[in-house]
Image (cartoon, rainbow, N blue to C red):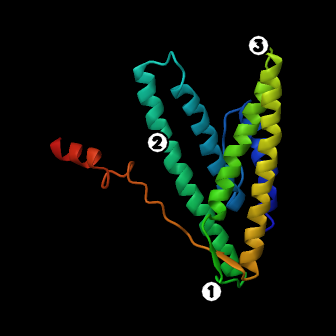
Amino acid sequence: MENLYKINQLQIELVMCWHHQTPQVKLNGFLGLVENQHMQNFLLWHEEDIARAPDVNDQEIARVKRCIDRFNQLRNDLIEKIDEEILKFLHEGGISSNPNCALNSETPGSMIDRCSIMALKIYHMKEQVQRKDVDEQHLADSSEKVRILEIQRNDLFGCLYQLIKDVSEGRRRFMLYRQYKMYNDPTLNPKIYQAGIRQ
């Protein structure tokens, strides 16, 4: 899949862009799904920061908690959609899953999600390297963490490309795993549906 090779740079560029303008999805198709999934991680990251601020009040914590739930639900839904699109692309290319080959426990969508989060970590760790209010040890530690994170993210992309190659050549397979998140579903979370009955 040619578009897989665009994801690495796309995620890095979007993190930088969204820190200076309102995040929005501009692409269509498969890369639009990847962009949207990455945006949920971006929004989630910054709400998590607010939740941990020592001076945040209870009302703001409640608002943040609901935002986190919403972004996390969308994030997971989009991971599944990314996997669906990859399986659809493989099927349309005449590539069917070989039931006798090794099953990969992690899906491409979940790997793309991990790379998205690591792109955010790298950006924010680089901010630490630019700080003027910390000592030299903090700057050195942060710089080393950036180096390690970039290696780890590149390694993960290498694993993603290898997985798709192996699937295409019948050496490996992956399944579309449904997560069935229950906490946001009013028919599955008892705290929601029991409240509805009481009303």
Q: Seen in the image, is 193 located left or right of residue 31?
A: left
Any mark on residue 100, and which?
A: 1
Q: CA distance from mark 1 to mark 2?
A: 38 Å
Circle 2 SS class: helix
Give amino acid for label 1: Asn
Mark sitting on residue 34: none
Figure check: 107 above or below 196: below
Q: Amino acid at mark 2?
A: Asp
Where disc 3 sits, the SS reads: loop
Q: Percent from the top left, x then y, of residue 96?
A: 66, 84
- Foreground mark, 1 or 2, reads 1
Look at 75% across and 42% down and name the residue there.
14
Which residue is at a point 44% across and 26% down the rendered structure image? 61
Q: Give x and y (percent) for residue 100.
A: 62, 86
Mark 2: few/some/many CA within 10 Å (<14, 14-19, 20+): some
Q: Which quadrant of the view contains residue 130?
A: top right
Q: Residue 90, image x and y in percent? A: 69, 77
Q: Is residue 51 above or below residue 28?
A: above
Disc 2 to disc 3, C-alpha distance: 34 Å
Q: Which residue is mark 2?
A: 69
Q: Are marks 1 and 2 in contact (CB under 8 Å)?
A: no
Name the spot of residue 114 as percent of width and height, x first. Answer: 66, 51
Count the marks: how many? 3
Q: Is residue 148 above or below residue 33?
A: above
**Which residue type does callout 3 highlight?**
Asp
Q: Residues within 10 Å of mark 3 (few under 14, many from 20)?
A: few
Q: Quadrant of the C terminus?
A: top left
Q: According to the image, label 3 marks what residue? A: 133
